[in-house]
């Protein structure tokens, strides 16, 4: 599927460094090319901090555009190594062909039809009918403001931005005799299209999901929030990849401090490549040594829109359908967007079910190990007898048995994700028959253990967020070791340590366990229970401190 | 990094320490019943161990579901330890369901065996104690029971079931037994258990394969204790009387005469209140029983639709209960002089001063105790038919 994608709206991000960078650049410009004129349109261009910092080693990028067209072409070819997907086309315009022009674009990232119709056709054919008796510097202005019917035009003076635009899919127009170039918006590439998100499905609710194209993703959010205070800031991160990273938030609702903290954390990133939002997540999270995610990620535009409306901030990264949301509290990982589309009563019950399955996923194998090897007296006699009869003839201790089966299950799960689709069914047969049945019949493992592992596995799939499920997957093994060593005592110790650790976590300054610890009564209406929408009149208190009123809603009443 | 190193160094503590008290399920010999008999110079301890793979799961081989082992020793603890030469697994007594004392053991005194039972930390106190009537404890642990695969469970459930529905038996836990042995104003009682039928075939695994088992375990009669020694047995009516007095009747069947035949009233609820008082320096006990029931069976031609007839039945119903209560009091006062009702405790509660005086000679005082019994019984409903069709047949 093809879609027209204009140049992203670029916003200047004003921070302390930008002033410094400007100065740096000016100095470099003066010492660099003697032909260059001073850059005037600096403020219109995005400031790329990470890039500027490493500029000293990348001299060719700061080189300014020369007034000699052929010199520019040679430089472009030299820098890009004659790459075959870079198309350079020079031509003449004007009645007698007195104006020499050239366009440069990347094949595959551009819309060739619009280059044909809007740029080449205009400049080569239609321009002949008009009278061009202006000097060449003015000619540049004339083409920009008079001739080209293109929405996005950015003036460029140096090669660093030149390459950035060309490699992002814009078409560069260069004019002989002018030290400026024009970046013409013509981005268009093959796109997967908006599809149903594969990682977070719902029964009721919108079925569209984010794609790999940033612009499509921002559009999906804008479609949901038509408010002028929905602000979007874009910057490029990654020295080599120049990945567009956008943050979206509701100005006035989002906490300004969180926004500026996020900006400064993003500015601090100095890395060569950002290929997925996971890179950003690991580079800006609050606590590094924790299995728990402190940044939420989702494929669902409705979840992002809801988060933005709560006052949270979305981070969109070009090239991935996974959008990050900060701050992320523990409760958010237990909430599915469907909770808000279903009736409140069933949504509440399902949330309770999720918390139950949280404990099941985390503790079932360890509880089994603890009770069956330390606390047999806790079991009712008939249950003990049936468990004991299962264990009869099993060669391994319960802990080894549990560890074995859990590892086998993890292998099966990983294989299921990784293997080619076509052999998927054969793996499930192997899993179900070999592990489930044959192992029990052969007496390697007890049937109880298979039930326990299956229960654990199914419970861990209940979470709406995969990243939280991963945390429990890892912790489960720790708890099993504790259970095998100290029994229930070990499990309780582990839980205490886990809760202490969770209490120490923060996500962009917010306590991770809020609104449970610290306890916020007002936010309990959307915690374990989900109250009906007419009672959800306040935004979460800690997240949006400024504007917590969602409106004056009252419970619907029948007419009198 | 330093923090990580610390955590890493702490890991061996977890891995190298613990596990010492862990034990796998298939290393346990789950004891469900224990029998204690007296020998010439010590005890004979028998344990009934579950063979769990024969009880559940699908790998049954046709062996017996429970195995009874016995071993003698100078003390019970010694005998239990020495059982390990017979049993390849660790004896696990947390799931014990019953303890049986041989009659000889019970008559000699059970205080000493009770010490080891109370001291043992693994024992939960939710099992029931019984006395093997007229036999050794080992004999009662040597019987296959029908329906319930685990004989100890059969005893446990039968005790609870018959206490709830029939009344003359009594569930007694370890704590209750110890506290009534120690108490001066109350004596202990335990239900009797005996093997009916042919004891020889009882231990055979095929016993439970007969539709009508050749032998089995039966619970009946209350054993009366004085201090820790068994002094005798109460018959069924007296046992029921004891249950009425101690407010243990939940439901039972009461036969009352009617025109030469019988009517059975199913007691559906019964409440007993005991009040002790001192009158002119003499202890006195008032027993108030309120019983309600429904007609369960009518064999005579009485016209139940007439209120005066019901009133008459109520009177006889009351009379029957009263007779049982008074009979049991009489038996215990005259025959055993053992206050299993806890009348002494009642006097203690109402008049501690007087109790101090009476305490030393309570056995004598109990034998001459003045007990006043009032019974209020009422038939509440007649079942699904009001008038018996006996009458129509006769007409």
Image (spheres, coloured by chain):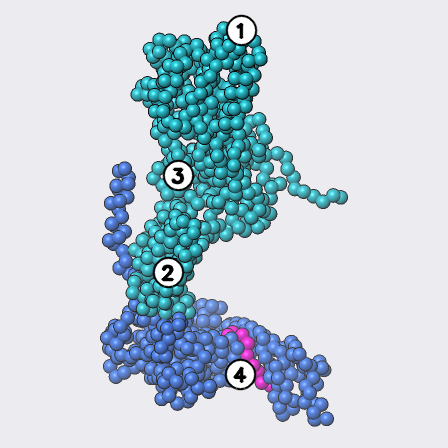
Badge 4 and badge 2 both on one subunit:
no
Location of residue B9 in the rendering, given as x and y in whole percent from the top left corner: 24, 45
Please tell me whether mark 2 or mark 3 is closer to you in this view: 2
In the rendered image, the vertical position of residue A185 relative to residue A472, given as above or below:
above
In the rendered image, the vertical position of residue B218 relative to residue B93, given as above or below:
below
Numbered disc 1: secondary structure: loop
Badge 2 and badge 3 both on one subunit:
yes
Residue beneath label 4, please? Answer: B324
Residue beneath label 1, please? Answer: A133
The residue lying at 30 percent from left, 82 percent from top is B38
Quick check: is B256 in the magenta stretch?
Answer: yes
Please tell me whether mark 4 or mark 1 is closer to you in this view: 1
Say which chain tag 1 marks: A
Q: CA distance from mark 4 to mark 1?
A: 133 Å
Of all chains in the rendering, the one displayed in blue is B
Numbered disc 2: secondary structure: helix
Numbered disc 4: secondary structure: helix
Magenta stretch in the rendered image: B247-258
Location of residue A171 in the rendering, given as x and y in whole percent from the top left corner: 47, 22
Within-10-Å neighbours for mark 2: few <14, some 14–19, many 20+: some
Displayed quadrant of residue A178 = top left
Quick check: is B390 in the magenta stretch?
Answer: no
Colour assigned to chain A in the rendering is cyan
Q: CA distance from mark 2 to mark 1?
A: 84 Å
Numbered disc 3: secondary structure: loop
In the rendered image, the vertical position of residue B367 relative to residue B278, given as above or below:
below
Badge 2 and badge 1 both on one subunit:
yes
């Amino acid at each position: 599927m093809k879609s027209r994608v204009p140049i992203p709206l670029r916003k200047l991000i004003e921070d302390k460094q930008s002033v410094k960078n400007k100065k740096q650049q000016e100095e470099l410009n003066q010492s660099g090319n003697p032909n260059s004129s001073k850059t005037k349109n600096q403020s219109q261009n995005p400031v790329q901090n990470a890039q500027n910092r490493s500029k000293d080693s990348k001299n060719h990028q700061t080189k300014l555009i020369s007034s000699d067209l052929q010199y520019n072409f040679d430089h472009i070819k030299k820098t890009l190594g004659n790459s075959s997907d870079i198309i350079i086309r020079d031509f003449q315009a004007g009645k007698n062909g007195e104006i020499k022009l050239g366009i440069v674009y990347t094949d595959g990232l551009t819309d060739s039809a619009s280059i044909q119709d809007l740029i080449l056709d205009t400049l080569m054919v239609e321009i002949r009918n008009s009278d061009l008796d202006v000097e060449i510097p003015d000619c540049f202005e004339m083409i920009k403001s008079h001739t080209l019917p293109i929405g996005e035009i950015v003036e460029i003076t140096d090669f660093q931005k030149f390459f950035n635009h060309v490699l992002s899919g814009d078409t560069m127009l260069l004019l002989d005799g002018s030290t400026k170039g024009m970046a013409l918006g013509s981005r268009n590439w093959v796109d997967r299209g908006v599809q149903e998100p594969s990682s977070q499905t719902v029964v009721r609710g919108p079925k569209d999901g984010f794609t790999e194209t940033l612009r499509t993703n921002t559009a999906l959010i804008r479609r949901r929030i038509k408010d002028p205070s929905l602000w979007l800031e874009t910057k490029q991160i990654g020295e080599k990849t120049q990945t567009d990273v956008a943050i979206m938030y509701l100005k006035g609702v989002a906490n300004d401090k969180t926004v500026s903290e996020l900006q400064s954390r993003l500015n601090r990133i100095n890395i060569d490549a950002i290929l997925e939002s996971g890179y950003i997540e690991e580079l800006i999270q609050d606590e590094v040594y924790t299995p728990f995610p402190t940044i939420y990620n989702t494929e669902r535009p409705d979840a992002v829109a809801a988060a933005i409306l709560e006052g949270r901030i979305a981070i969109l990264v070009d090239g991935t359908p996974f959008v990050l949301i900060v701050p992320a509290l523990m409760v958010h990982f237990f909430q599915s967007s469907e909770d808000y589309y279903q009736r409140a009563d069933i949504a509440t019950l399902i949330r309770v079910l999720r918390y139950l399955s949280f404990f099941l996923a985390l503790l079932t194998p360890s509880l089994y190990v603890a009770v069956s090897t330390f606390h047999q007296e806790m079991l009712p006699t008939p249950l003990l007898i049936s468990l004991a009869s299962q264990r009869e003839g099993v060669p391994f201790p319960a802990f080894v048995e549990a560890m074995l089966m859990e590892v086998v299950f993890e292998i099966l799960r990983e294989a299921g994700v990784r293997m080619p689709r076509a052999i998927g069914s054969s793996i499930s047969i192997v899993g179900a028959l070999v592990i489930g049945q044959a192992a029990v019949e052969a007496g390697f493992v007890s049937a109880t253990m298979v039930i326990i592992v299956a229960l654990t596995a199914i419970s861990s799939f209940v979470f709406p967020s995969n990243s939280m499920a991963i945390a429990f997957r890892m912790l489960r093994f720790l708890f099993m070791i504790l259970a095998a060593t100290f029994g229930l005592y070990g499990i309780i110790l582990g839980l205490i340590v886990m809760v202490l650790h969770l209490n120490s976590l923060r996500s962009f300054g917010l306590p991770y366990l809020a609104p449970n610890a610290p306890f916020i009564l007002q936010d309990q209406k959307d915690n374990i229970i989900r109250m009906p929408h007419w009672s959800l009149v306040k935004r979460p208190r800690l997240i949006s401190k400024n504007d917590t009123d969602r409106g004056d809603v009252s419970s619907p009443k029948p007419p009198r | 990094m330093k923090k990580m190193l610390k955590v890493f160094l702490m890991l061996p503590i977890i891995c190298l320490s613990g596990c010492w008290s862990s034990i796998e399920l298939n290393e346990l010999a789950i004891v469900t019943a224990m029998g204690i008999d007296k020998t010439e110079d010590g005890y004979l301890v028998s344990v009934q161990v579950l063979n769990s793979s024969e009880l559940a799961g699908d790998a049954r081989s046709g062996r017996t579901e429970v195995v009874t082992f016995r071993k003698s020793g100078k003390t019970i603890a010694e005998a239990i330890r020495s059982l390990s030469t017979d049993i390849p697994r660790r004896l696990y007594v947390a799931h014990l369901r019953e303890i049986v004392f041989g009659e000889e053991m019970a008559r000699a005194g059970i205080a000493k065996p009770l010490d080891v039972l109370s001291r043992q930390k693994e024992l939960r106190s939710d099992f029931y104690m019984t006395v093997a009537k007229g036999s050794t404890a080992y004999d009662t642990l040597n019987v296959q029971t029908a329906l319930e695969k685990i004989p100890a469970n059969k005893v446990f459930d039968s005790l609870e079931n018959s206490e709830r529905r029939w009344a003359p038996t009594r569930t007694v836990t370890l704590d209750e037994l110890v506290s009534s042995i120690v108490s001066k104003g109350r004596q202990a009682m335990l239900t009797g258990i005996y093997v009916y039928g042919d004891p020889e075939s009882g231990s055979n695994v095929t016993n439970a394969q007969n539709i009508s088992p050749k032998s089995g375990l039966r619970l009946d009669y209350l054993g009366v204790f004085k201090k820790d020694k068994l002094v005798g047995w109460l018959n069924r009516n007296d046992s029921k009387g004891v249950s009425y007095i101690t407010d243990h009747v939940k439901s039972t069947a009461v036969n009352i005469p009617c025109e030469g035949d019988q009517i059975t009233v199913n007691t559906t609820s019964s409440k007993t209140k005991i009040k002790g008082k001192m009158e002119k320096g003499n202890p006195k006990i008032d027993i108030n029983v309120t019983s309600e029931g429904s007609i369960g069976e009518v064999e005579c031609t009485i016209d139940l639709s007439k209120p005066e007839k019901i009133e008459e039945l109520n009177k006889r119903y009351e009379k029957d209960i009263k007779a049982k209560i008074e009979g049991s009091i009489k038996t215990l006062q005259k025959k055993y002089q053992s206050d299993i009702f806890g009348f002494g405790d009642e006097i203690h509660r109402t008049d501690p001063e007087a109790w101090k005086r009476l305490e030393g000679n309570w056995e004598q005082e109990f034998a001459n105790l003045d007990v006043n019994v009032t019974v209020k019984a009422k038939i509440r409903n007649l079942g699904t038919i009001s008038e018996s069709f006996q009458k129509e047949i006769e007409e």
